[in-house]
Image: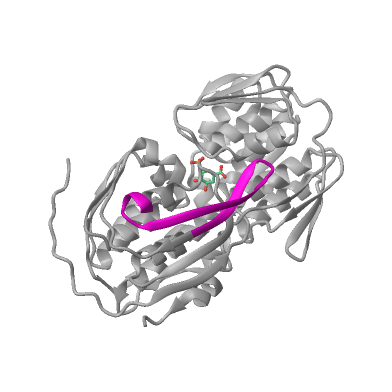
Amino acid sequence: MRHSVKQSAPKQPDFMQIRGSLTFAGDKSISHRALMLAALTDGECVVHNPARGQDLEATRRCLAACGIESAWEGNSIRITGGTLINPTSDLYCGNSGTTVRLLLGLLAGQAITARFTGDESLSRRPMDRVIAPLAGMGAKIESAQGHLPLTLHSRQLNGITNQSPVASAQVKSALLLAGLGAASTTTVIEDLPTRDHTEKMLSALGAPIEITESQIAVQKLKGNLPTFEMIVPGDPSTAAFFAVAAAGLPGSELIIRQVSLNPRRIGLYSVLERMGASVVYQQADQILGEPMGDIKIEATPLQGVTLTAKDIPGMIDELPILAVLATQVEGVTEIFDAGELRLKESDRIAALCQNLKKLGANVEERVDGLTIAGPTLLKGNSVRSFGDHRIAMAMKIAGLFATGTVSIDDSDCINISAPEFDDLLNQVLMNST
Ligand code: S3P
């Protein structure tokens, strides 16, 4: 059912502005993959500007338990690849879905025996999407009905051809990493393109991989990957919170420097353009197949937008902040085909709906998404993060569009992905002139 609520624009108070430029810590998805691929080399790799935050530490800790040592040196991680060993303690993945799903694939391919655990949120999230295809390759994985804790038993894998019913880079990557150790070819077919860091990095490192438009095939890796040194481009998903603030707060202008410009990660920025924002890209570099450069965003009057299946994978993690922006723009924003949001660190559809309603927004919850009619002048109130870093950051930005104070019950969870969030916001938040 389409929504047709018409509202007149509320009188805007003097909101703050975003002005200046920011450089972000490295992209979380690329950082996880850099550490996992370094584990398959036979020497020392250096990852500059990796993600800060608890999720990447979970991957580092789990790899260390499997014999892959690493250490921070300033703003870099030095990591020594070699032979993965069976861990003698549980692999605690904390809150990180990428850690458990990708590592399950990587370790399955290396015939490792390991037990995976996680926090309460991760233990609620579905793992059958990776368990089933890995089992199809011959892996033996015991689980609590498709949930953590999982026990992986050492087995030699065979290849598989898999077309996942969910558009998921985590599922794709788990299978490709497993395929590096499988006896025959592993082929992943994608209906909708998801983030392609795993295949790009493997290809850049000379692994036996073939990439076409909707299909990736990987062969068993003979020996090790070559050692590498890389700079991780800034995280476009963390930057998205700032981009939205800049796009929506009149008078704002923000330059996001050295951020990933991977076309499969910048869906939010394209949607901002569709809404009428001024977004200018300047590509500067390419590192292990990953384009990076600057994005400049200027505030302009914005319109609502309709998002459907093809839009979702390219901005899956940015939908919470897009929903906040939708409350501020003229017209109706409809987010369809985003049921995956219910399976993230929290049920993000329910969390957004509950919080935005508390702030006075005109929001309707659907099974597969949200309908938001704007613009609404938000009013301060208490909201919940549900322990979800992206909900907490989205609510911090909602506070910039509100009169009064938006108080968040628990924003420590921001440390899961972006401990630098408040410092960065303080650098660019100004009184309007
Ligand atoms: C990620 C893929 C996405 C995303 C997650 C990180 C990755 O999950 O939501 O934050 O690094 O591959 P899905 O691929 O499961 O949608």
Report the residue at 17% width, 67% height from top.
Answer: 9
- 140 or 72, nearer to the observer: 72
Judge whether 39 appears above or below 418 on screen. above
Q: Where does the C terminus fall, quadrant-wise?
A: bottom left
Q: Is residue 39 left or right of residue 246?
A: right
| Residue 208 rendering spot, x and y as whole percentages | 72, 25
Report the residue at 57% width, 30% height from top.
Answer: 131
Q: Is residue 327 left or right of residue 390?
A: left
Q: Is residue 51 left or right of residue 364?
A: right
Report the residue at 48% width, 68% height from top.
Answer: 411
Residue 387 visible, this orientation? no
Hey, which residue is sitting farthest right in the picture? 43
| Residue 3 rendering spot, x and y as whole percentages | 16, 47
Judge whether 7 appears above or below 136 on screen. below
Q: Where does the N terminus fall, quadrant-wise?
A: top left
Magenta residues (range): 272-295
Residue 207 visible, this orientation? yes
- 413 or 26, nearer to the observer: 26
Is residue 412 within the magenta segment? no
Is residue 292 within the magenta segment? yes
How many numbered discs? 0
| Residue 77 rendering spot, x and y as whole percentages | 76, 57
Picture colour scheme: one colour
Report the residue at 62% width, 61% height from top.
Answer: 25
Q: Is residue 117 left or right of residue 146?
A: right
| Dominant SS type (magenta) | strand
